[in-house]
Image (cartoon, helix red, strand yellow):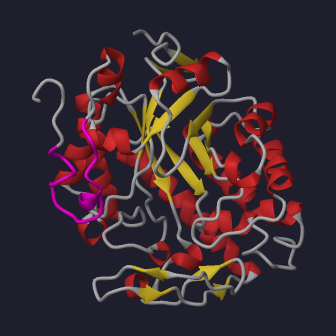
């Protein structure tokens, strides 16, 4: 069966890709000591047939780490590690490597950072985080003073500069799933009264400032952003998601970004978030169905055909099928992901999934 829309080329500005299938960002906890190494390079190179490879969340500053062995991009050693990855991807295929910049904010933890987490407001998240010493409760974060916001903004800028210097095509700013930029957007985590909170205009302000600063450093066509309107992951709540993202998209519409990446949270917020994004943002739209669900090929092809998306990101299917585009186009059987290996470290369940050629 053919899927002429999903496997059609896409061009927008400088971006030109042979099909519409992207690798979604996937935390894999295998950057030992926060530095990407040969194993990480092998993993991404195996998936270089993706139109765009969005990497795992990568902390732009040391105080942004919330998980074991997640990579950073704030030191020369980490930059060299990402160059190893970028070089391997470039040698293996034509996929565009995009490093996702993820500051965990209030769901960072002092076990990893050695200091109190930072956030828009001093509101702790419910729940616990994994550490090698066992599960630990999330800590109450320190509210970022207004004059410290520039430090956080500049950390994203520096990480973006390092990503490009390492050979990545661009960066994706993670403003979704309860991490720092999402915490600024959400009414449940942002109770600031300094112009960076209070209302919708205030809550989108810092995110827009970060986007514009990163754009000024590496260019708008190399900057993407990920959002998840109304998503409740990491104990998040947004009382006015529709209004918040209308305001955010209105600001982003003035920029011709690499893409806007939307997690389909329609069932959570009660309206069509993909339709909202498509109406409000005129540029490239990447969509992702969710953490545990992914559109089948017919559904993905229909999204492209109906103009609801330009690119479709797959996570678990790409995790278990390094050659996913080829498998989908051929209608071949897919490997099943082994979720017991998602975060355990080492090559098992990471670089040992067979391709069609070596199955």
x and y percentages locating residue 279 in the rendered image: 80, 32
Q: Nearer the viewer, residue 299 or 190?
A: 299
Q: Quadrant of residue 276?
A: top right
Residue 44 is situated, as x and y percent measured from the top left of the image, at: 28, 42
Q: Which residues are magenta?
A: 335-352
Magenta span includes 337: yes
Closer to us: 103 or 322: 322
Taking the image as shown, residue 170 lies to the left or right of residue 133, namely right
Question: Which residue appears farthest toward the left when viewing the image?
Answer: 358
> Is residue 258 something that shows in the picture?
no
Q: Nearer the viewer, residue 301 or 55?
A: 301
Across and down, in percent, residue 141 comes to: 61, 87
How many marks the image carries: the answer is 0
Q: Is residue 220 visible?
A: yes
Magenta span: predominant SS is loop
At x 50%, y 78%, the residue is: 108
- Quarter occupied by the N terminus: top left
Q: Is residue 338 magenta?
A: yes
Q: Report the residue at 49% width, 73% height from top.
A: 64
At 75% from the left and 40% from the top, the residue drawn is 272
Where is residue 347 drawn, in percent x and y?
A: 15, 54
Does 214 sit above or below residue 332? below
Q: Is residue 32 above or below residue 220?
A: below
Look at the image and tell me in which quarter the C terminus lies: top left
Q: Which quadrant holds residue 152?
A: bottom right
């Amino acid at each position: 069966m053919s899927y002429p829309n999903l496997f059609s080329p896409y061009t927008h500005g400088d971006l030109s890709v042979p099909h519409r299938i992207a690798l979604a960002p996937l935390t894999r906890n295998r950057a030992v000591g926060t530095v990407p190494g040969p194993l990480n390079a092998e993993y991404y190179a195996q998936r270089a047939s993706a139109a765009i490879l969005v990497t795992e969340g990568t902390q732009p500053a040391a105080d942004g780490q919330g998980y074991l062995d997640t990579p950073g991009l704030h030191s020369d050693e980490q930059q060299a590690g990402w160059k190893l990855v970028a070089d391997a991807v470039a040698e293996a295929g034509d996929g565009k490597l995009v490093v996702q910049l993820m500051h965990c904010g209030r769901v960072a933890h002092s076990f990893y950072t050695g200091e109190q987490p930072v956030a828009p407001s001093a509101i702790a998240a419910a729940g616990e985080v994994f550490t090698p010493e066992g599960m630990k409760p999330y800590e109450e974060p320190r509210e970022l003073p207004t004059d410290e916001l520039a430090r956080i903004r500049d950390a994203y800028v520096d990480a973006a500069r390092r990503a490009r210097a390492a050979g990545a095509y661009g960066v994706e700013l993670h403003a979704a799933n309860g991490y720092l930029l999402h915490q600024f957007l959400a009414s449940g985590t942002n109770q600031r009264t300094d112009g960076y909170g209070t209302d919708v205009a205030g809550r989108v302000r810092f995110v827009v400032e970060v986007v514009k600063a990163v754009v000024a450093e590496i260019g708008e066509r190399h900057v993407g952003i990920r959002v998840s309107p109304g998503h409740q992951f990491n104990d998040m709540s947004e009382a006015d998601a529709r209004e918040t993202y209308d305001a955010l998209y209105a600001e982003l519409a003035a920029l011709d970004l690499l893409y806007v990446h939307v997690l389909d949270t329609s069932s959570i917020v009660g309206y069509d978030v993909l339709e909202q994004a498509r109406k409000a943002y005129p540029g490239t739209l990447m969509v992702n169905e969710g953490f545990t669900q992914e559109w089948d090929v017919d559904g993905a092809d229909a999204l492209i055909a109906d103009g609801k998306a330009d690119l479709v990101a797959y996570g678990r299917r790409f995790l278990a099928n390094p050659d996913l585009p080829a498998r989908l186009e051929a209608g071949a059987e897919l490997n099943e992901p082994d979720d017991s290996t998602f975060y355990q470290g080492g090559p098992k369940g990471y670089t040992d999934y067979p391709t069609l050629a070596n199955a």
